[in-house]
């Protein structure tokens, strides 16, 4: 299992890695190195036409999931955020 911590506020649920030894990675495409998952965030609304943080062609959706990864050359997201390609 992947240990996660979560926080909740109205319309937002956030999971963050609580143990950096268990690492999910994404590779390929334009990424030069593996990127390590460190946060999963959900945004939702109270109707079927609102809730997402971002829009596609001007339309909102009832749910949006965001996956945050940091470049594996860094020790943590806090370090990676200081570099242009540190977070994906």
Image (cartoon, rainbow, N blue to C red):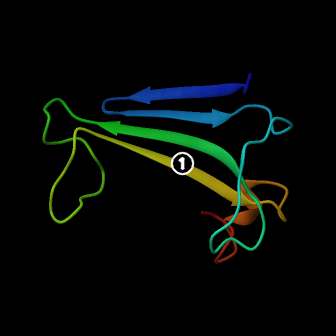
Looking at the picture, how far across and down is residue 32, in whole percent? 75, 74
How busy is the neighbourhood of tag 1: few (under 14 within 10 Å), some, or many (20 plus)?
few
Residue topped by disc 1: 67
Residue located 22% across and 38% down the image? 62
> Outermost residue toward the front?
28
Left or right: where does residue 71 sit relative to residue 21? left
What is the quadrant of residue 49 in the picture? Answer: top left
At horizontal 31% and vertical 29% (from top left) the residue drawn is 10
Where in the figure is residue 81, as x and y percent of width and height?
66, 65
| x 17%, y 29%: residue | 46
Count of marks placed on residues: 1
Work out whether 82 lies above or below 63.
below
Asked if residue 6 is positioned above or below residue 70 in the image, the reply reads: above
The answer to which of 59 and 7 lies nearer the viewer is 59
Q: Is 55 placed left or right of 20 in the picture?
A: left
Instruction: Please identify the quarter of the rendering in which residue 78 is found.
Output: bottom right
Q: Residue furthest bottom?
A: 84
The N terminus appears in which quarter of the rendering?
top right
Which x, y percent locates residue 26? 68, 54
Q: Where 71 falls versus 6 (above or below)?
A: below
Q: Quadrant of the C terminus?
A: bottom right
Residue drawn at (71%, 60%) of the image: 27
Q: Quadrant of residue 73?
A: bottom right
């Amino acid at each position: 299992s992947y240990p996660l911590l979560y926080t909740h506020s109205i319309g937002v649920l956030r999971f963050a890695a609580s143990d950096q030894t268990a690492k999910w990675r994404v590779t390929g495409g334009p990424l030069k190195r593996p990127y390590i998952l460190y946060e999963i965030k959900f945004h939702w609304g109270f109707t079927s036409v609102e809730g997402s943080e971002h829009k596609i062609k001007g339309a909102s959706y009832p749910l949006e999931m965001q996956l945050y990864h940091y470049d594996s050359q860094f020790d943590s997201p806090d370090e990676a955020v200081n570099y242009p390609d540190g977070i994906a």
